Every structure is written in structure tokens, then in C-alpha cells.
């Protein structure tokens, strides 16, 4: 497909107008058309503007082959163009250029239909609908769009709108026309009841979608907010009965993507019976978080960091995830997967791959994902000796009794599913050989946090060692990227305490986002939904990435379950199992989140 495109993310505007400024493009809507068959007369017949209210490059034209040119104020020499046109037309049979090729340059001719499959569930209510409203509020959605909720529950359009309205909020820093924008958004939300495995019901959905698309070129996005055991049924029905007839069709798939290498591969094969790889958007919402998005910017656009990003200067890297609450009624789902599958194999491993990858050729999605796959394929598969697992137990604190994991009524009393895990991983390549990458994730711990901690090596021959005493770790630099809460980047450095004596102190060079930026940080789902609508795949997981990730964790998961290894129990609200400290000590490392200054 020949394409001329200029993609602009979106722009903030307090205007109630939702003009489609975030993505202007032209597409020759006919597959496999050789360029020699495209009439220059017809391509030139419409003067199509690639300008947008957000585009500062008003004189830039993006050419058919990707080259960039500028408009000229002088009169064009039309003779060479006429000669080229005549030559091209002379080789096209008359019957092949009677019908004009449809050139998509008018936003009135296309629309986007977003269907949330599983619309009555918690994820849809708490995350997906609020994220879509936030995009609408920021004028990031197309001028013509419709949102459909689809689930088995019986519901009217009005009942869906009432349900959705309870979770919608406006930006803290933008309250203009909030109620008005909310009402406009809700008027674009509709509901269709149906079974997930019924082609007939999806045909009814298709009919309703077409009524709202009003003859425009239809682009359709399906968000599967449903349990993984019904993914395939829903994809089959949507693909066969409700795909876009003349635009694109994309499907967002939520984790978990299987339980191990075998089930993940089977899921991928089943999806690809009905979809191409570039139609599948496997979402990991942690990749949409602001600080994860900033990770590559921090490294590749700051000269002080890139030369230090290797085994020569970095002693270890820690990826820490903790929640201060338990399963709280979700134990039935969690017990089937456990903390390793739920957090480590996807969220933390994806962040690790972004952290450790080589410089990509470009910011193109495939170039970035290629580098991530190289990292994953260079890693050693985990063994049981590389992992410590734990499970929280009941604990009384301050007169309040907190339940243990197996006290959850949805969890079997004899369950050995880990609610905590720590692991040591290694990347066997020239940059990272010998550097331990430590992961730690758990529920019902003493605080809630997600962060990356980069601990640098000791200064060789440090003449100030005596001022630090025997704890040399306090003399090392540490870079901390706090993903949540209170997003921040800070670097721990050594400095002299003011005074006549020589007393050293450890201080932070701190970028606290809420202090530096007044703008509210968008939710990760906003970024990822916008990327899916625009066809940007950089923050979504490719099938070979998924295969490589599962190949690391499947052997240890199999051993843990087959050998029924008993987890170490830790009190609700504590810092986790003692075994995690022994695991770190094996590599002469201390967990950075347990220090006095933390």
C-alpha cells in the first residue's frame, strides 16, 4: 500500500472542538497496486494538506518514497511533469484507469470504532473508559469515533453511560468545560450485549457499528478485557464477523499470555489463525508508564550516562516491585498464576530488556523490539537455586489483624503459590557479562513501590574510604528511577558536610516529577490506547519477545510446581522473606530499598 503520512500525537486544547489533528494521512486504498499503475493525474488531482493545528512544519511535504521536500512559492515548471504523466499513462490500459483510486486525505471519510470486549468488568470501568475519556479531553481522538461496550450482561446504552460516568475524571490541571466534555464523550458510547463465542452476536455488533460509521472508511479496534480462556473465541468471532471491510482492524490482548512456553505458543498460533502479527497488540501497561518511557531518553540522550552503562562501571541492577495489600478477593485468579507469572515474567522482564538493550538503529518499533529480543536471548534460563519464593501469612499490628494468603476464601488452604519472589538473572553478552540483575516482587509488603536501582562500583583507591568506615556500600553512587508512586529520578552522590571538619554525607541529586512539572502525568493506558489507534507498536510485545521471555522462566516454574517447593512465610506488612537477603548477599549486594536513607 502506497502511503503518505504525517503522524502527530495530539495537542492539548481547551476548545470543545475535536478536530482530527493528531493524525493526518493519505493512503492509496488499494492493496498491491504497482506504482506504475497509479495515475499522476489522479494523485495530483486533489491538493491534500498534511498540515495540522499541532504541526509546526507547515511547509513540509512528505513524498511518496518517504523523502521530504518543501513547498515553493515560484511557478513550477510543468513541462517535465506533463511528459512523465503522458509516459506513465501510455503504458496503462484504458480500462485500468477509468475508476479513480480512492485517496484517503479527507478526515470526513474515515472513522474509528473502539469496542471494549468485557465492558462490564473492573479493568474496563477503572482503566479503559477513563483512559479513552482522557484522550478525548486532550483532543487526541479522531474527529469521528465511536466507543462500544460489549459483554454478556444485559444493559442499555443509558445504563452503560451511567456506569462509565462514575469513573470519569478530568485532569487536575485542566477543569475547563469538564462536565460538557464528559457529556459529549458519553454520547459517543454505546452498548451491545452478546456472547463471546457467538458469531451471530458479533454479526449484530458489525451491523450496529456500520450504522454509526455512516458509510465512512471504517477502522476498528477491539480491546479484549476478558479472561484468557475466551481470547480465541472472541478473536475468531470478531475477525470473521466484525472486521473492518475497508480499513484496519486491530486487537489489544491483555496479559497473561499463557502460563508457560507451551501455552503461550499455542495462544499465539491460535491468534494467528485469524489475525496477522501486526494486528495483534499485546499490552503490558508498565511499558506505558512515564518513567519507563523516559528510560531510553535518560540513557541515550545524556552523555554522562551512556558511557557508564556497562559492566565496567555498574556493579548490579535491581528491579523492585512491591504492593502493600494482598489478593483481597482476587485469590482465585492469582492462585492460578502466582507472582512470577503475574509480575516478573512480563512487567519486570520487559523493563530489564529496555534497560539493557543496545542502542537501536532508530526509534522505529521494530528496531527497538529487535534489540529487546537480543537481550532476552542472551540471558541464562533461571534455575531453582536462582530464586527465592515466599507467601504472606496473617499478622496482627496495632490491634488490627491482617489475613494471610490462604485465609482468602477464593484460595485453596494448601496452596503453595508464591506471593513473593526474588531472582538473580544474568545477561551473557559483552556489555553485561557478570553483572547480576536482581528482581524482587511481592504482595502484602511494608510499602507500595516500583523502581529501578543501578548500583555503581566502588571508586578504585578511594582516598576517602576511612571517612565512610567499614560500610563501603555507603560510598558508592546509585541511580534510582522510581516508576511509582511519586515518580522521580535521583542520583546518590557523596559530598562534604559544611563545617571545619572532614565529614562526608550522601545526598540526592533529585528530579521529583511533581515538583518539576505542573502537568499531571497521563495514565499508562492512555499512552498505549493512543499508540494502538495510531498503529505504533513500540510499546507492545512481539511474539518472538514473548517466546524468549517464557523460555527464561518456564524451566524454573516447572521445577517449583513439580517439586512442590514450599515458600518461605513472611508476615503481612513486613519486608518479605529473609531468604531474599541471602540471595543478594551471594553476589555481595544489598537490596537498595532497605537502606537507612530509604
Image (cartoon, rainbow, N blue to C red):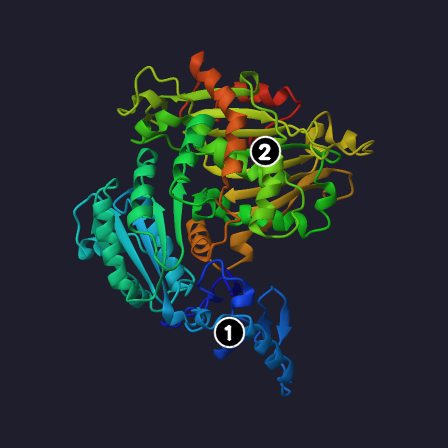
Point 40% across, 44% down: residue: 275
Work out whether 514 lies above or below 94.
above
In x, y percent, where is residue 487?
A: 52, 47
Asked where in the image residue 457 lies, by quadrant, the reply is: top right
Name the N-terminal-most of marks 1 and 2. Answer: 1
In the foreground, 470 or 556: 556
Instruction: From the image, tell me which residue sits under label 2.
Output: 376
In the foreground, 393 or 375: 375
- Left/right of residue 429 with respect to residue 336 in the rendered view: right
Point 45% across, 31% down: residue: 265
In the foreground, 26 or 496: 26
In x, y percent, where is residue 462?
A: 81, 33
Instruction: From the image, tell me which residue sits under label 1.
Output: 43
Work out whether 412 lies above or below 31.
above
Q: Give the secondary structure at mark 1.
A: helix
In the foreground, 55 or 328: 55
- Callout in the foreground (1, 2): 1
- Count every numbered label the image shows and give the total: 2
Which residue appears farthest toward the top when viewing the image?
563
Amino acid at each position: 500500500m502506497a502511503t503518505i503520512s504525517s503522524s502527530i500525537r495530539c495537542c492539548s486544547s481547551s476548545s470543545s472542538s475535536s478536530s482530527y489533528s493528531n493524525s493526518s494521512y493519505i493512503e492509496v486504498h488499494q492493496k498491491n497496486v504497482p506504482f506504475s499503475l497509479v495515475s499522476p493525474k489522479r494523485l495530483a488531482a486533489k491538493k491534500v494538506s498534511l498540515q495540522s493545528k499541532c504541526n509546526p512544519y507547515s511547509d513540509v511535504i512528505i513524498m511518496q518514497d518517504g523523502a521530504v521536500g518543501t513547498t515553493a512559492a515560484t511557478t513550477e515548471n510543468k513541462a517535465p511533469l506533463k511528459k512523465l504523466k503522458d509516459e506513465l499513462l501510455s503504458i496503462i490500459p484504458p480500462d485500468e484507469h477509468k475508476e479513480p483510486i480512492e485517496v484517503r486525505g479527507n478526515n470526513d471519510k474515515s472513522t474509528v470504532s473502539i469496542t471494549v470486549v468485557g465492558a462490564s468488568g473492573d479493568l474496563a470501568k477503572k482503566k479503559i473508559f477513563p483512559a479513552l475519556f482522557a484522550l478525548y479531553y486532550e483532543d487526541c481522538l479522531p474527529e469521528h469515533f465511536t466507543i462500544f461496550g460489549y459483554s454478556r450482561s444485559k444493559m442499555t446504552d443509558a445504563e452503560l453511560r451511567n456506569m462509565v460516568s462514575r469513573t470519569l475524571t478530568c485532569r487536575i490541571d485542566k477543569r475547563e468545560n469538564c462536565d460538557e466534555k464528559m457529556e459529549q464523550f458519553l454520547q459517543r458510547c454505546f452498548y451491545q450485549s452478546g456472547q463471546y463465542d457467538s458469531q451471530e452476536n458479533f454479526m449484530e455488533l458489525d451491523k450496529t457499528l456500520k450504522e454509526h460509521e455512516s458509510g465512512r472508511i471504517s477502522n476498528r479496534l477491539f480491546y479484549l478485557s476478558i479472561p484468557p480462556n475466551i481470547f480465541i473465541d472472541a478473536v475468531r468471532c470478531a475477525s470473521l464477523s466484525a472486521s473492518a471491510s475497508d480499513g484496519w482492524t486491530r486487537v489489544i490482548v491483555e496479559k497473561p499470555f499463557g502460563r508457560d512456553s507451551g501455552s503461550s505458543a499455542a495462544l499465539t498460533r491460535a491468534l494467528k489463525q485469524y489475525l496477522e502479527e501486526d494486528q495483534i497488540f499485546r499490552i503490558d501497561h508498565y511499558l506505558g508508564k512515564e518513567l519507563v518511557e523516559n528510560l531510553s531518553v535518560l540513557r541515550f540522550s545524556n552523555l554522562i550516562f551512556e558511557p557508564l552503562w556497562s559492566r565496567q562501571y555498574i556493579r548490579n541492577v535491581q528491579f523492585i516491585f512491591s504492593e502493600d495489600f494482598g489478593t483481597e478477593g482476587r485469590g482465585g485468579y492469582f492462585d492460578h498464576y502466582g507472582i512470577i507469572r503475574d509480575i516478573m515474567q512480563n512487567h519486570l522482564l520487559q523493563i530489564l530488556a529496555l534497560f539493557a538493550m543496545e542502542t537501536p538503529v532508530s526509534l522505529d518499533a521494530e528496531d527497538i523490539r529487535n534489540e529487546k529480543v537480543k537481550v532476552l536471548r542472551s540471558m541464562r534460563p533461571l534455575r531453582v537455586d536462582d530464586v527465592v519464593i515466599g507467601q504472606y501469612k496473617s499478622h496482627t499490628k496495632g490491634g488490627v489483624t491482617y489475613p494471610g494468603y490462604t485465609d482468602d476464601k477464593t484460595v485453596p488452604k494448601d496452596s503453595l503459590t508464591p506471593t513473593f519472589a526474588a531472582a538473580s538473572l544474568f545477561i551473557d553478552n559483552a556489555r553485561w557479562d557478570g553483572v547480576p540483575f536482581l528482581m524482587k516482587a511481592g504482595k502484602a509488603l511494608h510499602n507500595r513501590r516500583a523502581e529501578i536501582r543501578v548500583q555503581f562500583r566502588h571508586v578504585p583507591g578511594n582516598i576517602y574510604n576511612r571517612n565512610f568506615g567499614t560500610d563501603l556500600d555507603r560510598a558508592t553512587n546509585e541511580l534510582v528511577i522510581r516508576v511509582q508512586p511519586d515518580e522521580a529520578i535521583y542520583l546518590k552522590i557523596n559530598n562534604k558536610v559544611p563545617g571545619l571538619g572532614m565529614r562526608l554525607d550522601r545526598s540526592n541529586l533529585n528530579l521529583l516529577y511533581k515538583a518539576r512539572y505542573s502537568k499531571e502525568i497521563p495514565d499508562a493506558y492512555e499512552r498505549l490506547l493512543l499508540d494502538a489507534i495510531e498503529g505504533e507498536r513500540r510499546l507492545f510485545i512481539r511474539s518472538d519477545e514473548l517466546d524468549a521471555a517464557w523460555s527464561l522462566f518456564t524451566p524454573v516454574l516447572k521445577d517449583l510446581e513439580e517439586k512442590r517447593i514450599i515458600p518461605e512465610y513472611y508476615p503481612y506488612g513486613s519486608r518479605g522473606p529473609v531468604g531474599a537477603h541471602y540471595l543478594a548477599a551471594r553476589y555481595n549486594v544489598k537490596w537498595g530499598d532497605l537502606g537507612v536513607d530509604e
